[in-house]
């Protein structure tokens, strides 16, 4: 079984300033360099997300964890001989509230960490020793953030986004080292020589090296797509479509994570956002072999059936429906191989239901003005019923962690955020060169944690009886939730439509 040891004495790392520590909402990215692991944080996630979506709201005290949104990088010595140390903090002028992606890349110049920000503009910082950081001059990068780096054949690849996730353009760049060689756009849809059928078109949510090729996860209106480069040096007009139309469910829009395990590429794909954040829907897990054949590993009946040109949707080979039978598992947030096991962590949206309920209630007049009393009432009543069901079935809030020895049969090892209901996401996984597994959490309420995990030859941490009771309870709760969801989704879709119309009117004026 997996045994976990928490490495930080205080949530959010900063033992000398607990108020600052609480503002480190996510261990958003994690890499190693030399004797240390490095963690890039997200600051004050709840208020940042609420403000970006709804503008100025009456701030629930539990949302407002602080006002210092300057992103931080912390490090920890792997042998435990040194405490957590903050090694970098962005300037206020950068307007960057997190390091969403990091990578350790070896070029002909050096071995260094590269870290990409999220904010008004995406920036890339570099460090060769983990202590001294350079802000690289990268005016060629378009977008506000990045979710993904990759290193392939001595070149560094970065995918940038002009939205929180997804978007319409494939901003994929490469450089041997952007300190000395500007990033080059790999795919340029505006080029006269661009051939749409031979290139991914859409926002690049993920990058993964598999079978000596670069695989990209793309958002499109008809569903998520997977493309691979035909060569180990990706170029425009030299790509193959591996999977399309959301793997048979057009509601599958965004590739949240990818990982390689036993000659397969595993892909966790999330339903349409932001809808799935407000009305939780479970993710699907897909795998692709080296011959471009894909199959559904975790997933149920499609919510929006589609007909992919690349294959046919199958019944789940694991026997699990979407989210491991759990609609609150909205993301499969990280996928790694460790000790011949496939490790997958989730984002459990149940933690935020009460917050959503309180935000709508505390901003009642504003929401009614924007969406009307009927839509508002449907949403608030639905959240109230969901809260009652979570209590009725004693649902364990917090992220889940599942493992598999063959990529087909899965066992839950963690179902409650490691005994922390506010730790709603297993955000980062890192396997070090010492073959140790590190897990970074997302907890925007009280601050993130980093755990070290080890495998022991022992029985599962949950008995078969307990697991049977858990899944039986989950099944009963799902049945009752099906009666609540139609009203919730109708109210939310009307809210999103009205919001989009209002934003279009503002832009036109």
Image (cartoon, rainbow, N blue to C red):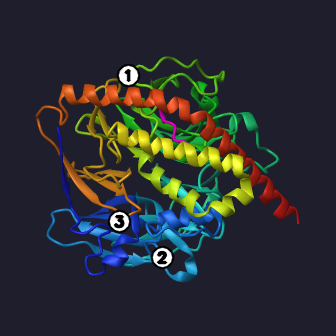
Q: Nearer the viewer, residue 89 or 410?
A: 410
What is the quadrant of the N terminus in the image? top left
Residue 164: image location, x then y, percent: 59, 56
Asked whether 57 or 284 is in front, the reply is 57
Position of residue 475 measured from the top left corner of the image (x, y, whole percent): 39, 26
Above or below, 466 relative to 366 = above
Picture quadrant where residue 161 is located: bottom right
State the image coordinates of residue 271 (x, y, percent, origin top left).
56, 38
Q: Is residue 111 visible?
A: no
Q: Which residues are magenta?
A: 279-285
Q: Label 3, secondary structure: give it.
A: loop
**Quarter occupied by the C terminus:** bottom right
| CA separation in Å, label 2 and label 3 | 15 Å
Does residue 483 lie above or below 9 as drawn? Answer: above
On the rendered structure, is 202 left or right of 90?
right
Residue 476, by quadrant, is top left
Where is mark 2, residue-wise? 70
Marked residue nearer the N-terminal end (3 or 1): 1
How far is the residue under mark 3 from the one under mark 1?
A: 34 Å
Residue to which mark 3 is pinned? 447
The residue under the point 79% across, 58% down is 502
Left/right of residue 400 with respect to residue 293 in the rendered view: left
Q: Residues within 10 Å of mark 1 (few under 14, many from 20)?
A: some
Secondary structure of the residue carrying numbered label 1: loop
- State yes or no: residue 219 in magenta: no
- Asked if the residues shown at circle 1 and circle 2 are in contact, with their CB atoms under 8 angstroms apart, the answer is no
For marks 2 and 3, give the one nearer the viewer. 3
Dot 3: few (<14), some (14–19), or many (≥20) neighbours within 10 Å?
many
Q: Look at mark 1 in the image and give the residue it sits on.
A: 318
The residue at the point 30 percent across, 77 percent down is 18
Does residue 116 sit above or below 429 in this rendering? below
């Amino acid at each position: 079984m997996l045994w976990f040891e928490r490495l930080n004495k205080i949530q959010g790392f900063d033992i000398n300033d607990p108020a600052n520590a609480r503002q480190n909402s996510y261990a958003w990215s994690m890499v190693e360099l030399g004797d240390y692991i490095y963690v890039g944080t997200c600051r004050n996630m709840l208020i940042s997300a609420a403000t970006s979506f709804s503008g100025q709201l009456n701030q629930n005290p539990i949302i407002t964890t602080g006002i210092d949104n300057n992103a931080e990088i912390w490090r920890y010595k792997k042998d435990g001989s040194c405490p957590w140390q903050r090694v970098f903090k962005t300037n206020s002028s950068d307007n960057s509230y997190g390091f969403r992606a990091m990578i350790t890349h070896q070029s002909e110049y050096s071995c260094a960490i590269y870290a990409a920000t999220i904010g008004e503009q995406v920036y890339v910082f570099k460090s060769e020793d983990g202590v001294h950081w350079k802000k690289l001059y990268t005016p060629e990068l378009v977008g506000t953030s990045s979710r993904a780096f990759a290193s392939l054949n001595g070149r560094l690849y970065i995918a940038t986004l002009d939205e929180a996730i997804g978007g319409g353009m494939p901003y994929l760049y490469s450089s041997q080292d952007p300190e000395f060689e500007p990033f080059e756009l790999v795919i340029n849809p505006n080029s006269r020589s661009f051939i749409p059928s031979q290139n991914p078109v859409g926002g690049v949510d993920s990058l993964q090296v598999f079978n000596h090729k670069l695989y990209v996860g793309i958002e499109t209106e008809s569903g998520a797509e997977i493309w691979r480069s035909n060569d180990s040096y990706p170029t425009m007009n030299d790509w193959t479509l591996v999977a399309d139309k959301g793997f048979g469910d057009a509601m599958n829009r965004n590739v949240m994570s990818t990982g390689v395990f036993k000659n397969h590429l595993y892909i966790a794909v999330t339903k349409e956002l932001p809808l799935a954040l407000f009305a939780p829907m479970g993710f699907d897990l897909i795998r692709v072999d080296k011959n471009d054949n894909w199959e559904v590993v975790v997933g149920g009946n499609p919510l929006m059936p589609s007909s992919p040109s690349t294959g046919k949707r199958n019944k789940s080979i694991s026997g699990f429906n979407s989210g491991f039978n759990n609609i609150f598992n909205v993301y499969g947030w990280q996928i790694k191989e460790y000790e011949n096991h496939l490790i997958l962590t989730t984002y459990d949206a149940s933690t935020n239901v009460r917050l959503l309920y309180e935000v709508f209630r505390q901003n009642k007049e504003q929401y009614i003005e924007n969406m009307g009393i009927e839509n508002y009432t449907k949403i608030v009543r639905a959240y109230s019923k969901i809260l009652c069901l979570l209590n009725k079935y004693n649902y364990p809030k917090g992220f889940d962690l599942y493992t598999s020895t063959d990529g087909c049969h899965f066992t839950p090892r963690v179902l409650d955020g490691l005994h922390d209901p506010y730790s709603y996401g297993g955000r980062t996984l890192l396997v070090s060169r010492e073959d140790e597994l590190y897990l970074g959490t997302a907890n925007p309420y009280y601050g993130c944690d980093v755990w070290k995990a080890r495998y022991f030859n022992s029985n599962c941490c949950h008995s078969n009886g307990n697991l049977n009771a858990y899944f039986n309870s989950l099944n009963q709760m799902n049945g009752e939730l099906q009666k609540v969801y139609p009203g919730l989704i109708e109210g939310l879709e009307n809210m999103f439509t009205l919001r989009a119309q209002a934003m279009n009117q503002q832009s036109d004026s």
